[in-house]
Image: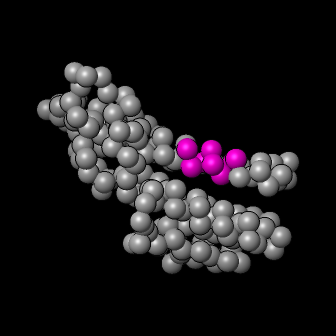
Amino acid sequence: VLVTDDKRLVESAAANVFERVIFVDHDSLDEGTEFEELVEAALGAWVAESQMFSLLWIHSKGLRGAWDAPYNYRKIMCDEEDPEPPEDIAPISFEVDDSTDPDEIFGVSCAVVGQVVVMDQAIGELLGTIRELKQDNETLVGLIGVSGYPLGEHGMV
């Protein structure tokens, strides 16, 4: 079973290797975050069909999706004298050069931290559910991420 919120993946040939593909459309998100909704949908599918499918693959847009963590999560890294982090929920992207204000990059880093905290909490809930279902000895969990370099290091945020 593949559960994803990335329409590009659903429409690609890569999705054809799965017996079942579930697309999570975040248009009707009432509360929580997109990542939490994705993990909840994946858990619902897995719990209902774990006997039929031995593999659950959750693919997230990750930081290319909405930055919709609670704003106070963005302030985790901030001291009182730091500027306020940006409030945008759209992923932030811009070119960096010698004239770029380091505070701007720091603010974006704070927004990223907020998203990562939400992801960490949702993954913790996923692992907790696996333990509650007594599937922890039968389940292999792997987390894979890309683009793991400091913001702005390669001339882009």
Indicate the position of residue 79 as horizontal and vertical percent values: 30, 22
Which quadrant holds the N terminus? bottom right
| Residue 124 drawn in magenta | yes
Q: Is residue 126 left or right of residue 23?
A: right
Quadrant in the picture for residue 33: bottom left
Q: Inspect the magenta stretch and tell me whether residue 156 lies in it.
A: no
Where does the image place residue 67, in percent across and percent down from the top left? 37, 52
In the image as oriented, which residue stretches furthest toward the left? 99
- Which residue: 22% across, 21% down? 81
| Quadrant of image for the C terminus | top left
Q: Nearer the viewer, residue 36 or 66?
A: 36
Magenta stretch: helix, strand or loop mostly: helix
Taking the image as drawn, is residue 151 in sight? no
Q: Is residue 3 above or below residue 156?
A: below
Q: Which residues are magenta?
A: 121-128
Q: How many marks?
A: 0
Q: Position of residue 141 (x, y in %)?
A: 71, 50
Residue 136 appears in view? yes
| 123 on left or right of 154 | right
Q: In the image, is 115 to the left or to the right of 51?
A: left
98 or 76, nearer to the observer: 76
Residue at 55% from the left image edge and 67% from the top image edge? 4
Of residues 8 and 124, the one nearer the viewer is: 124
Residue at left offset 49%, top offset 56%: 35
Residue at screen point 71% across, 66% down: 46
Vertical side of 57 occupied by 135: above or below: above
Q: Residue 123 in the image: x percent, y percent?
A: 60, 48
Colouring used for the render: one colour
